[in-house]
Image: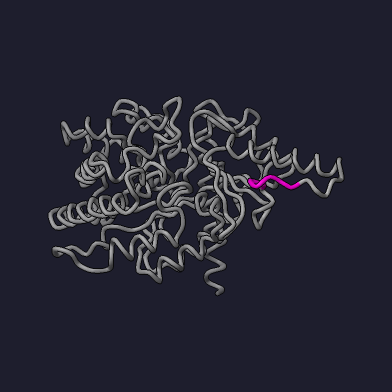
Amino acid sequence: MKAIGYCANVHPGRNLGQLRESLKGPMARIAQSLAQTTLPVSLWLSAETIRELSTDPQKASHLRDQANDFGISFVAINAFPYGNFHAQRVKHAVYEPNWTDGRRAHYTMAVADLLPLLVADGTEHISISTLPLGWRGHFSASGSGASVGIASTALEQIASHLHSIEKTTGLHITLDIEPEPGCAIETSEELVGFFSHCLPATTRAGVHLRRYIGACVDVCHVAVMGEPPYEFFDRCVKAGIAINRVQLSSAIKGTHSAHDLAALAQFDEPRYLHQVVSGFGAARRMWEDIPNFLVDANADMQALAFTNVAANPHIVEPTHSLANTNDQQWRCHWHVPIHNAMINGLETTSNAITGTLEAAMRLPNAPLIEVETYAWTQLPHIDRLSNDQDIEAGIVQEILYAQVCAATAQVASDIT
């Protein structure tokens, strides 16, 4: 297994100036605290930062040299957020522009063009993560079939571009689609369906599409959709889709009890979108943010309470009732620290980390592994870390926890 790093989208990086400050500040201090030979870092590059770097390619080389001086190696790029991921309000904006908009392909190719200058000498492969086509409602506004066709054509163009870069520089760059609740691709089943219909395991114009387009698996997203990571991996492997990157992250979960719903309400915050999913399979239902879910959940509780008090068999539960799902547990898209089994009185999906790593060890290729917890400053007040030093210590703790989980997974893998 490759060394475990972390995704730097947790740090401000709206422009090159902010990125440089984050590199010489928190990133450098985290690397120093871990005292590893080299700390693998997945870099978030906004469109504005890319524009600044593209005006003078030597700026990218300088960034790489600075990172090397701090004991940091850029091993992956997060090109999911195009705009400012640390704006006061991000929400649905993180999914824009989607893959029907030419700006998304142009930005992604510009990221790829800079990578030979950003990576350390001897690097053979680097991953760029991207959104799963777009937010479902926005992406399919002009018709799902038309949108998928436009997106698949753009991805083919990206594959051709990455092929040209590899021929010229020897650097193998993959663009890795990251399924997410509420998006055009949410699950492994949908990912396989998209690849089967739009990115077949064939060569087009001399380019093997799947050499350059693969998957990035976010463990929080998988948990929210109620899909065991090993099943996700297995389905992709059988379909011939390379999993080039795994993001270790935890979601929060609870029941429809008054305690858990009150605790969940404290996680509602103005910056990021926190999708909630209840049920499994055909009964699975999604709410796009915490307030939407709580409206239905509270209405459901009031209806049930009234039914119990009145003892009236003629009162019917509302049609939106959460009791209509086949499971009374909900899961929420909230990237919480992976070493916390509980947070603010709610359980997390932290116990999936070791199993995910064990499953990753069985993949045909060794994926990049990174911790991705970006919302430290948005946590409920009791758990919130507001100063840089505390957040950096938390990230160090996460990486160390992931390393322990990896060691445990390795032992289990060796036994089986």
- The image shows a total of numbered marks equal to 0
Can residue 358 be seen by looking at this rendering?
yes
Q: Quadrant of the N terminus?
A: bottom left
Query: Where residue 361 sits in the image (x, y, percent)?
Result: 46, 65
* Segment tinted magenta in the rendering: 316-321
* Vertical relation: 33 (above or below) 38: above
Q: Quadrant of the C terminus?
A: bottom right
Horizontal side, residue 281 vs residue 117: left or right: right
* Vertical relation: 15 (above or below) 318: above
Task: Name the one closer to the observer, 56 or 344.
Answer: 344
Query: Where residue 139 sits in the image (x, y, percent)?
Result: 36, 45
Query: Where residue 411 sits in the image (x, y, percent)?
Result: 55, 66
* Corner quadrant of residue 17: top left
Please check the rendered image and state whether residue 317 is part of the magenta-colored stretch, yes or no.
yes
Horizontal side, residue 18 vs residue 154: left or right: right
* Corner quadrant of residue 90: top left
State the predominant SS element of the stretch in magenta: loop
Please check the rendered image and state whether residue 337 is part of the magenta-colored stretch, yes or no.
no
Q: Residue at x 68, y 45 (%)?
A: 318
Task: Name the one closer to the observer, 182 or 357.
Answer: 182
Q: Residue at x 49, y 28 (%)?
A: 388
Q: Residue at x 40, y 59 (%)?
A: 191
Q: Residue at x 35, y 63 (%)?
A: 242
Horizontal side, residue 408 vs residue 50: left or right: right
Task: Name the one closer to the observer, 236 or 316.
Answer: 316
Horizontal side, residue 205 vs residue 150: left or right: left
Query: Where residue 364 sits in the image (x, y, percent)?
Result: 38, 69
